[in-house]
Image (cartoon, rainbow, N blue to C red):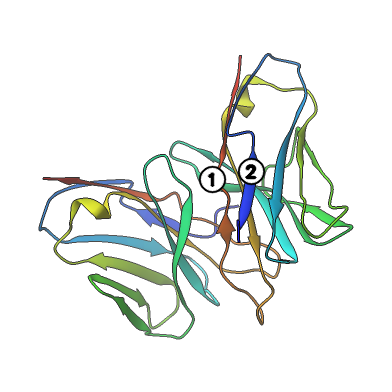
Amino acid sequence: NAGVTQTPKFQVLKTGQSMTLQCAQDMNHEYMSWYRQDPGMGLRLIHYSVGAGITDQGEVPNGYNVSRSTTEDFPLRLLSAAPSQTSVYFCASMGRQGAFGELFFGEGSRLTVL
Amino acid sequence: GQQVMQIPQYQHVQEGEDFTTYCNSSTTLSNIQWYKQRPGGHPVFLIQLVKSGEVKKQKRLTFQFGEAKKNSSLHITATQTTDVGTYFCAGPWTGNQFYFGTGTSLTVIP
């Protein structure tokens, strides 16, 4: 199994540009999420989804959109990139094993906004 | 907002020395998880603690959950260079998300 796959691994954008970070998982997990990681800030939740067609906001949702049309895919869209969105982005999924389980992370997407 | 506070932020140890990172909460945690992130890598799940006073071991790693379920610790005995990375606690599971601590970055000096 590939697990959680993120693309691209690296991206440089100019302020105001838009882009989509792709995330796909092949474990049939219901729960998927996007985190951003900044130095000294840990991992902060942007958006999450508990199943196809259902999404909700996390701790830092402003400037980002998500959709969940299939169980496998959970893309993150930056509508108008800003330098404050320079970060490392991780997609993570989790199977609903009882009340909770472990998060499986993708390898990350390193985004620089100039 | 932040549910768990993690200390220290950085730790440098000589190879062979012990290392401990702590995770604290002002409220009772239903559960807590620990993850390790190697430099340039992604977080990888290590363990989950659920019961009050629980202690779990993975080789040289010892994980503890406090009696009041408000704190947890990860202790590494006799560190090795392979232990280098950032260790995160995460908790509690709220039904739709985890809250991650800010992490402890461990450097092991050979």
Labels 2 and 1 share a subunit: yes
**Mark sitting on residue A107:** 1
| Residue type indicated by callout 2 | Gln
Circle 1: element type: loop
Rendered-image quadrant of the C terminus of chain B: top left
Q: Where is residue A64 in the image (x, y as percent from the top left)?
A: 76, 36
Q: Where is residue A22 in the image (x, y as percent from the top left)?
A: 72, 41
Q: Quadrant of residue A97?
A: bottom right
Circle 2: element type: strand
Name which residue lies at 75% across and 66% down.
A30
Name which residue lies at 11% across and 52% down.
B15
In the image, residue B103 above or below residue B75? above
In this view, which residue lies farthest toward the front?
A1
The residue that mark 2 highlights is A6
Between B10 and B106, which is closer to the camera in this rendering?
B106
Q: Give how far apart the Cα atoms at labels 2 and 1 are.
A: 7 Å
| Residue type indicated by callout 1 | Glu
B84 left or right, relative to B25: left
Between B55 and A28, which is closer to the camera in this rendering?
A28
Instruction: Say whether disc 2 or disc 1 marks the residue closer to the N-terminus.
Output: 2
Task: Tell me if mark 2 has few (under 14), some (14-19) or many (20+) residues whose alpha carbon lies within 10 angstroms of its own.
Answer: many
Name which residue lies at 11% across and 58% down.
B17
